[in-house]
Image: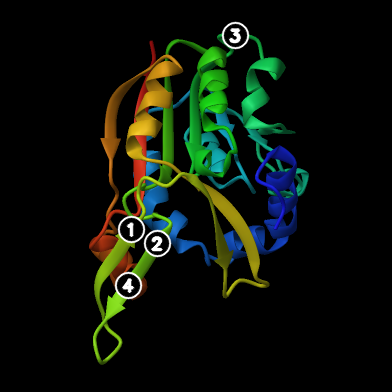
Amino acid sequence: MPRFDADGVREEWDYAADAYAKGQADGRDYYRLEFFGPYQIEMCGDVKGRSLLDVGCGSGYFSRAMADRGAKVTGIDISPRMIQHAQETGGPITYEVLDAARIDRRFPAATFDMATACLTLQDVPEPAEALRAIAKVLKPGGRFVSSIEHPFSSMPFRQWHRDDKKAKKWLCVDRYFERGAMPYTWKRWSYEFTTRALHVTLEEWVRWTLEAGFTIRGMREPRPTEQALRDHPDLADAARVPYFLIFDLTKT
């Protein structure tokens, strides 16, 4: 397992990129496409004409969603291979290979009206640095809409208790206050790959956010719609416990 720093994260996602991009194009990533992604898009509101920075754009899903709604989008990602996939999809979007913690070294202060990060920041080794960098490149009053894995359901110990028929009864979680990068193996894609996400408490996320110079306008804990549950019954877990958390922030 590579170390959890910028080089290690780049290596993991470069390896994952081909399977990840194919899975999104084929609809395999329905958690993002049909569950929490639409919630975050709705939370962004009217973005027409706004200069928007999409942090950790991956193969370009959220960047394209914002561009389709009229934003002038710049997408950045630490993985060169991910950026290649994003560029192959075309569209009026500028893509760059860039570490989220170095955004303020690449762009002048107050460059963007808005920033987004769709399930990105927990994959960043130093989220506090990335939050500060994002704040610096936003204009005063600029918004940042960001989703993360929910700290309450992504603890170091996480296991469903099942009945005699293997049906899920309740989710068992533990070690909430432990801090560290947790590996996750993505199965049933075109090939298996492992990435890591940083688990910290909700208190720490809020502290980093406020110290970076943001005001919290709102938060959402998305739940699958009835249509999403009909199309994908295995999303039923996410209708019982919160899997994701979306922040709506304003630069102070």
Give the mark nearest the N terminus, 3 or 2.
3
In the depicted structure, whether residue 108 falls above or below residue 38? above
Observer-nearest residue: 112 or 105?
105
* Mark 1 crowd level (few <14, some 14–19, many ≥20, 10 Å Cα): some
**The N terminus is located in which quarter?**
bottom right
In the image, what residue type sits under mark 4?
Trp
Structural distance between the alpha carbons of marks 3 and 4: 46 Å
* Local SS, label 4: strand
Q: Where residue 18 sits in the image (x, y, percent)?
A: 72, 60
The local secondary structure at tag 1 comes to strand
Residue drawn 56% across the image and 44% down it: 123
Residue 80 placed where, x, y %?
77, 43
Give the mark, 1 or 4, whose residue is nearer the N terminus: 4
Point out the frontmost of discs 3 and 2: 2
Q: Name the one closer to the observer, 196 or 178.
A: 178
- Going 70% across and 16% down the picture, which residue do you hit? 105
Q: Which residue is mark 2?
A: 157
- Horizontally, residue 30 falls left or right of residue 150, namely right
Rounded to the nearest whole Å, what is the CA distance between mark 4 and mark 2?
10 Å
Compared to residue 149, the image places residue 137 above or below, namely above
Q: Which mark is residue 109?
A: 3
- The residues tagged by marks 3 and 1 sit, at their Cα atoms, a distance apart of 41 Å
Closest to the observer, 48 or 199: 199
Distance between mark 1 and mark 4 Cα atoms: 12 Å
User: Whole-Å distance between the Cαs marked 1 and 2?
Assistant: 5 Å
Q: Secondary structure at mark 3?
A: loop
Of mark 1 and mark 2, the one earlier in the sequence is 2
Nearest to viewer (mark 1 / mark 4)? 1
Query: Which quadrant is home to the C terminus?
Result: top left
Circle nearer the viewer, 4 or 2? 2
Q: Disc 2 residue type?
A: Phe
Tell me, yes or no, if residue 181 can be seen here.
yes
